[in-house]
Image (cartoon, rainbow, N blue to C red):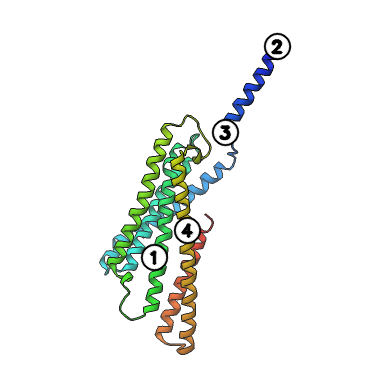
């Protein structure tokens, strides 16, 4: 074999090795033609969501202060705060479609998305449970879980737990990023073995939480519908029957909003 032929074969082998290594490291090129579309969509969501949530935050934390606090108000304030924080962090997600590196998005985007999205899911579940307990107990003394103190404790525990998971993930990811030499196209490529385990735990918790809240909402709505039907059969025009019907409509709205906002994810 001639020297020229040997050099060509060696060059071909080296090029193949580089290509394979690039694919392994997750550095292969991806189609970015849809990036402008996602940038526009998320920008519009940010502008609309920021405006609406800012108004809601102002209402609950300013005007609502004049009224007596209730467990429902506590949960609604926390839900509004979670949604508002989510809107504030949408620009981080937009950088995913602008920047050539995923480090900023992987470092904060996923963590913030997880924190605020599942805070919203859990607080919507608390609101639904609170409404259901109000329907079940009626005019009787409120259930212990309906007290303002219980609402504050549940809200605090929820935020502390989610923040603990998020902070742990960010710290472990930051440590993994310092030892990374490649520029991958997926955040999972930054994960060490320990972080991969935590990532699976977070996803498992997220799936269980989502399914639990979804099943609970369906259960609450079904039982509320049954109680409304029974009340209408006994006293079709009574005030209690009308209150149950209103609670039934509110529960339906809650189920629809939950499915529209979170089921696609």
What's the mark number on residue 24? 3
What's the mark number on residue 194? none
Q: Earlier in the sequence, mark 1 or mark 2?
A: 2
Contact between labelled residues 2 and 1, with CB atoms less than 8 Å apart: no
Q: Position of residue 98 (x, y in %)?
A: 50, 38
**Structural distance between the alpha carbons of marks 1 and 2:** 74 Å
**Structural distance between the alpha carbons of marks 2 and 3:** 30 Å
Q: Position of residue 158 (x, y in %)?
A: 35, 57
Q: Earlier in the sequence, mark 1 or mark 3?
A: 3
Q: Earlier in the sequence, mark 4 or mark 3?
A: 3
Instruction: Please rate how many residues cluster around mark 4, counting C-alpha atoms within 10 Å: few if below 14, some from 14 to 19, many from 20.
Output: few
Q: Quadrant of residue 209?
A: bottom left
Residue receiving disc 1: 126
- Residue occupying the point 43% across, 36% down: 176
- Residue occupying the point 46% across, 32% down: 180
Disc 1 or disc 2, which is closer to the eye? 2
Disc 1 or disc 4, which is closer to the eye? 4
Please state which of residues 67 and 235 is positioned toward the viewer in this rendering.
235
SS category of the residue bearing label 1:
helix
């Amino acid at each position: 074999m001639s020297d020229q032929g040997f050099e060509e074969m060696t060059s071909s082998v080296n090029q193949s090795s580089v290509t394979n290594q690039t694919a392994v490291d997750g550095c292969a090129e991806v189609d970015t033609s849809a990036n402008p579309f996602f940038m526009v969509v998320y920008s519009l969501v940010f502008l609309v969501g920021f405006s609406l949530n800012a108004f809601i935050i102002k209402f609950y934390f300013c005007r609502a202060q004049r009224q007596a606090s209730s467990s429902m108000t506590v949960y609604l304030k926390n839900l509004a705060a979670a949604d508002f924080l989510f809107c504030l962090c949408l620009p981080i997600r937009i950088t995913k479609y602008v920047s050539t590196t995923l480090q900023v998005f992987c470092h904060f985007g996923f963590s913030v998305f997880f924190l605020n999205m599942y805070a919203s899911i859990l607080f919507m579940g608390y609101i639904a449970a609170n409404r259901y307990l109000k329907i079940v107990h009626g005019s009787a003394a409120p259930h212990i879980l309906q007290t303002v103190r219980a609402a504050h404790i549940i809200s605090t525990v929820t935020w502390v737990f989610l923040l603990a998971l998020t902070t742990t993930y960010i710290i472990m990811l930051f440590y993994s990023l310092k030892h990374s030499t490649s520029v991958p196209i997926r955040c999972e490529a930054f994960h060490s073995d320990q972080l991969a385990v935590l990532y699976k735990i977070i996803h498992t918790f997220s799936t269980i939480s989502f399914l639990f809240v979804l099943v609970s909402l369906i259960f609450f709505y079904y039982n509320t519908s049954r109680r409304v039907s029974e009340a209408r059969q006994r006293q079709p025009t009574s005030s209690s029957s009308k209150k149950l019907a209103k609670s039934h409509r509110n529960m339906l709205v809650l189920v629809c909003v939950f499915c529209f906002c979170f089921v696609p994810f």
